[in-house]
Amino acid sequence: MSNDVVITTDAIEPTEIKPSLWTRYSSANPLMVAALALVLGLVFGAIVIATTTPVVLDAWRGMFDHWNGIPHAVFVTWNNVSAAYRDIFTGSIVDPQTFWHSLTTGKGWTASLTPLSETLTYATPLIIVSIGVGISFQTGLFNIGANGQAVVGGIGGALVGSMIKMPTFIHLPLALVGGIVGGMVCGAVPGVLKAYTGAHEVIVTLMFNYVTYAFLLYMVLSTPFQQPGQSNDISRTIYPTAVLSPLFGSSSGLRVSFGILVAVAVVIFAWWLLDRSSLGFDFRVTGANPLAARASGINAKMVVIVVFLISGGLAGLAGYVQVASTTHYIDGGFLIGDAGIGFTAITIALLGRNRPMGTVWAAILFAALGVGGRNMQALTSIPLDLATVIQSAIVLFVATPVLVKEIFRLKKAPTSLLTLSTTGWGS
Amino acid sequence: MGIVSTLLTPNEELTLKVPIARNRRTPVIGAIIVAIGLFSLFVFGLGTHAGSHSQLTFDPLNTTNAPWHAGTLTFDAHWTNISLGIVMILIGVEVLWRRPRRFVMGRFGIVSLLFLFTLLVWASRGPGPSPINFINVTSLLVGASATVMVLVFGSLSGIMCERAGVVNIAIEGQLIAGAFLGSVIASTTNNFFYAAVGGAAAGAAIGWVLAFFSLRYQTDQIIVGIVLVTMLSGLSSYLNLQVLTPYPNFNIGNTAPNLPIPLLYKIPIIGPVMFNQSGFWYAMIVLIFVVSFALFKTQYGLHVRAVGEHPRAAATVGIHVIRVRYINVVLGGAIAGLGGVAFMATQGQFQVGYTSGLGYIALAAMIFGKWRPSGSLVASIIFGLTVYLSYELVTYQVPVSLYVLQMIPYLITIAVVAGLIGRVRPPAADGQPYVPG
């Protein structure tokens, strides 16, 4: 990618002194910026906790009541913030106490591995959808509708999974394809409109999200798809033959499923597409310079439509993976609100710089924040939405590397920093 | 616009392209109008039994302030819809035949209003499935006026920002922030003026954040906007659980009192809709004039538009591009924040996610109105009526799923953005970062 295209020919090499490890890590390279953006995001979240938690505010209100009021208030603030972040960590990665217990006694491995398993379970669809979003970003197309595409994909896959009876080896792939097709249909609309009428994809995909939510409610409340004998907004359960079963067997108690293999396949596909195929080259050229792309004979309309098909297809696949590895049915709240993986995907793709591997790490990080946030909500009653706030703050800083560089007084980056840009309304 | 664009070749190219594009699209619009007309004729007109009747009522629901009775109007649903369907088809045929250059979208607006009317007549017909066999025009318009108001505030905010060349996609976030803070202030002080000031300040603060990132650091404006919306919806949900749920006193949800204008509010239909509203409504009307005047009749407006069209040229004649953009984005944010308070003042209690994408629909209204306050007012009325009706038709028990109805406003927005309006021409520098020097 653009990082690799830095000129390092032999002619230049001898004159340049190889940068020391310290220079390399204290400069504003993308990894450093991402890490520091994470720090800034956590600081922002800490400020939010400190300024809104009633206990903390009460402590500060009484800071002049007692001789040690101020230290006490600081102590309470620190306690609350650190408890929140500790719960995020223990709920998403590992709880040292239970882990030590299972190491020493050899028992309770399910309990000590559950946090990590949950994180991976949440990360799996996130990885898939974010890679799709990242592909569209690299082409300069802003696919905000991944959530809607995932919803329709989930519906498509669940339709195949719950309406037809077949053996596993054909049913599961067919259901996954159903998810892909659902997402593709939903992605094709903004793609075609963008290509042929110039409608800005941001508005079209955003509006399509709302259309798909209405469609979801319509589907789960109408006869063939609704769970028979139910009047609630809940769909039929998919057959066991279309389920992505747990990776370590259903007796292990860990939910992490074979969906993770699907995610690995998607990562490989994306890497091949972007770095090894001529189509991916067309994508990247179109994203880097649309005029140059047109001048060199790349069919811009085709690129737009194909990108939206791929992006939507991956989102749809993610939607079905989500269904098939967790709930096995769809309800009216599917992917709405906290679970809106399509919106998280935007931020993940930005954090992962739209590259497959970067996206994987970013997705695991954000899944950890989400899963840990749930644990935090249960233990400290700080709402889960804090995770969303932290995530969006991280992305704001990642998208503004210059600000991060200024705050931490980093040296100039050896390579150009991320500059993702969209086009205006007209084009 | 005027002076700057004549100096530039790219813009000349653009203006040359416009008539060609418009000619290509006019027949499409004509065909759509004919299709709508045919649909009304066959489904709403011929589909109803002859002899079924609908009633139009003009009395407001709350008759205490209106000491008059406009009476009701009964008409034949069958023949009304047939004749209106034919009128729509004729308008479509006229567009197809003459290919008018002006007022095509105006005709489309008229047809869409006629279509909504035939839909209502059909839904409320006498011997029909509906329990409500009359249309209360006044209460319908009063109900829709709340949605229209939010859309007008939102699109005015968009105009302020985009005329200066900054895409403000964070309108939704500013609405949320305004509604949240407005609810808290209105509940604690019971004074909607303070709530309006607070909400506007919250919107302005978000506008400032958008300006700070996109002007100082040239971060992509759409990314900043979307991240801000995500952050604010998360933050509002967070604060709702953390603050409003344990302290319900912060979110009582009283609505703003109506301030009837003496005498005028007694006019049938127009009175309750226009002159018996909360202060936000009058503020909106004033704001439309103020924004139009400021942008198109003052030197400041000329500067703003120059900055939005060609910042470098504006800078060479001594306009401080960044400052103009800062001012406009902050002011635009304040307008959207005010819109959020206005929304809260009509809906009551703050709830998470109750703006349901109105900020984005406002953006579409702005595009539909071609970045002009007057145009976006017309667009907001059409969109507002559609959004309101899509929820209201449920009470009429239309034999269409509620959820299909709820898709309609968004589908219309997509259709609008997909260039039903012909080639839209945004301010030339819209969304482009400006690097001084």
Image (cartoon, coloured by chain):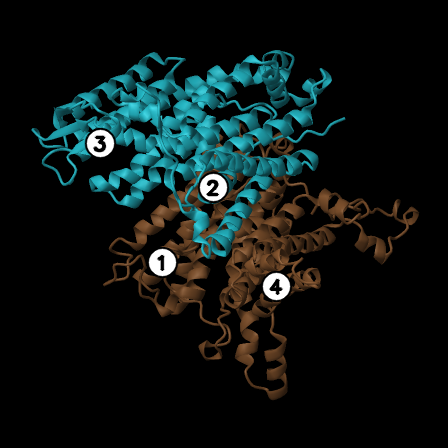
**Label 2 to label 3: alpha-carbon separation:** 41 Å
Dot 4: element = helix
Mark identifier at residue B279: none
The three-letter amino acid code for the residue at tag 4 is Asn
Q: Quadrant of the N terminus of chain B?
A: top right
Q: Nearer the viewer, mark 4 or mark 3?
A: 4
Instruction: Identify the hue of chain A.
Output: brown
Q: Which residue is mark 2?
A: B189
**Amino acid carrying mark 3 in the image:** Leu
Measured Cα–Cα span from mark 1 to mark 3: 32 Å
Between circles 4 and 1, the one closer to the viewer is 4
Give the chain coloured cyan. B
Q: For label 4, count other residues whose C-alpha is less than 10 Å away and answer few (under 14), some (14-19) or many (20+).
A: some
Kindly check if marks 2 and 3 are in contact, taking CB atoms under 8 A apart as contact: no
Q: Residue furthest bottom?
A: A105
Residue assigned mark 1: A331
Q: Secondary structure at mark 3?
A: helix
Residue at 37 percent across and 69 percent down: it is: A241
Q: Which residue is mark 4?
A: A80
Residue B159 appears in the rendering: yes
